[in-house]
Structures are given as structure tokens and as C-alpha cells.
Image (tube, grey):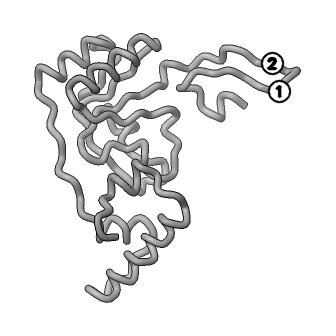
């Protein structure tokens, strides 16, 4: 676990054997230090060092919101909740804003601004991941792709389909 932060484990997507070993080590370390018996994500959360929360300056927040418009930027914490909880309720996050772009051009503008200002973003497709990578753990900006939900082409001959990033597997079926 030395040198691994929760961000590295969840966002850099360590492969399954490494992650399983981290959980095993975390459980043993917890048991040795406190006698506590935790499993899975609870063990990892209990022993990993958290990174400090990021802040977003009000003027920068306005610049992000301007890209998608007020209607598609969610800043109300109550309205943000569906975007901040992993579907099994194992991971919960915080964010200053959820941006819901409606075009590739808006996504590009958001990513460019984030890059130019060194602002961390967490992209979300259908928000159905099971590892917590879609949850903003350190106040990152959420880039929700749910409005990019068109099925562009279905090719029965090659048994393929072309869909936008916000199309969930359930909808594609």
C-alpha cells in the first residue's frame, strides 16, 4: 500500500490481481493495528491516505457553466446526488458542478478549459461502474455524458452498432 492513494487505486485502474492484493494487505494491516475486521472497499478506504479536496474558484466555475448553459449545469447539492453515488452505495463523492454537455464541441470546450486551468474532471457515461471511478472523490468537476445518448447506426450484417458516449448498455439492448 505504500505510496498508493485512493485516487490511484480508483482512477488509475490498477488491474484486478493488484487491487485484490491491496485489499488483502489492507485487511491484514487493519486487523494488526486495531483488531477491526473490514472487507473490500471499507478496508481500502480505512487505510489509504486521502488526497486533499480541490477547490474551484467562482470565476472558473462560471466559465465551465457558460459552456453548457445554466440549464445543463447542476450546482444544487440535492440535485447532484444521483451523480455522486456509486450504484451499490459503496462510494460517495462531492463536486462543485455537474456539467451535462449536449455536443462533442461542448465536451471539447470543457476538456480544453480543464486542461488549460489544470482542473480535474471525472467523466461519467451511464454511471453504472462498480469500482467507484465515476465518483468524484476530491471535488473534481463531473462531466456527465448522459445527453449524448443517440444510437447512430445499427449494422445487422456486421452485428455492430455505433452509439454516443451516454448510451447505457440497457438502452443499447
Numbered tag placed on residue 155 in the rendering: 2
Tell me what residue is drawn at x 28 percent, y 26 percent: 115
Tell me what residue is drawn at x 64 percent, y 34 percent: 169
Numbered tag placed on residue 172 in the rendering: none
Quadrant of the rendered image containing residue 168: top right
What distance separates the C-alpha of mark 1 from that of mark 2? 6 Å
Q: Quadrant of the C terminus?
A: top right
Q: Secondary structure at mark 1?
A: loop
Classed neighbour count for the residue bearing mark 2: other residues with Cα under 10 Å, few (<14), some (14–19), many (≥20): few
Q: Nearer the viewer, residue 64 or 111?
A: 111
Q: Secondary structure at mark 2?
A: strand
**Percent from the top left, x then y, of residue 156?**
85, 21
83 with respect to 2 (left or right): right
Q: Nearer the viewer, residue 88 or 17?
A: 17
**Percent from the top left, x then y, of residue 146?**
48, 25
**Percent from the top left, x then y, of residue 89?**
43, 53
Classed neighbour count for the residue bearing mark 1: other residues with Cα under 10 Å, few (<14), some (14–19), many (≥20): few
Q: Is residue 36 above or below residue 97?
A: below
66 with respect to 100 (left or right): left
Residue lying at the far right in this picture: please name it: 157
Q: Is residue 123 above or below residue 47?
A: above
Tell me what residue is drawn at x 77 percent, y 25 percent: 160
Quadrant of the rendered image containing residue 46: bottom left
Q: Quadrant of the N terminus?
A: bottom left
Q: Nearer the viewer, residue 118 or 38?
A: 118
**Percent from the top left, x then y, of residue 29?**
33, 82
Q: Which residue is mark 1?
A: 159
Query: Label 2 near label 1: C-beta < 8 Å?
Result: yes
Amino acid at each position: 500500500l505504500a505510496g498508493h492513494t485512493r485516487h490511484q487505486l480508483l482512477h488509475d485502474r490498477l488491474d484486478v490481481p493488484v487491487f485484490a492484493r491491496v485489499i488483502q494487505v489492507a485487511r491484514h494491516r487493519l486487523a494488526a493495528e486495531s483488531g477491526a475486521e473490514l472487507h473490500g472497499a471499507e478496508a481500502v478506504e480505512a487505510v489509504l491516505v486521502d488526497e486533499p479536496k480541490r477547490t474551484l474558484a467562482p470565476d472558473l466555475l462560471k466559465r465551465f457553466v457558460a459552456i453548457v448553459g445554466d440549464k445543463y449545469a447542476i450546482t444544487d447539492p440535492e440535485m447532484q446526488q444521483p451523480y455522486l453515488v456509486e450504484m451499490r452505495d459503496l462510494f460517495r463523492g462531492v463536486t462543485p458542478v455537474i456539467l451535462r454537455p449536449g455536443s462533442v464541441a461542448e465536451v471539447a470546450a470543457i476538456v480544453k478549459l480543464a486542461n488549460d486551468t489544470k482542473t480535474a474532471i471525472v467523466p461519467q457515461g451511464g454511471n453504472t461502474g462498480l469500482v467507484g471511478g465515476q465518483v468524484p472523490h476530491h471535488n473534481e468537476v463531473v462531466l456527465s455524458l448522459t445527453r449524448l445518448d443517440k444510437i447512430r447506426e445499427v449494422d445487422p450484417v456486421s452485428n455492430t452498432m455505433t452509439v454516443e458516449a451516454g448510451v447505457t448498455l440497457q438502452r443499447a439492448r
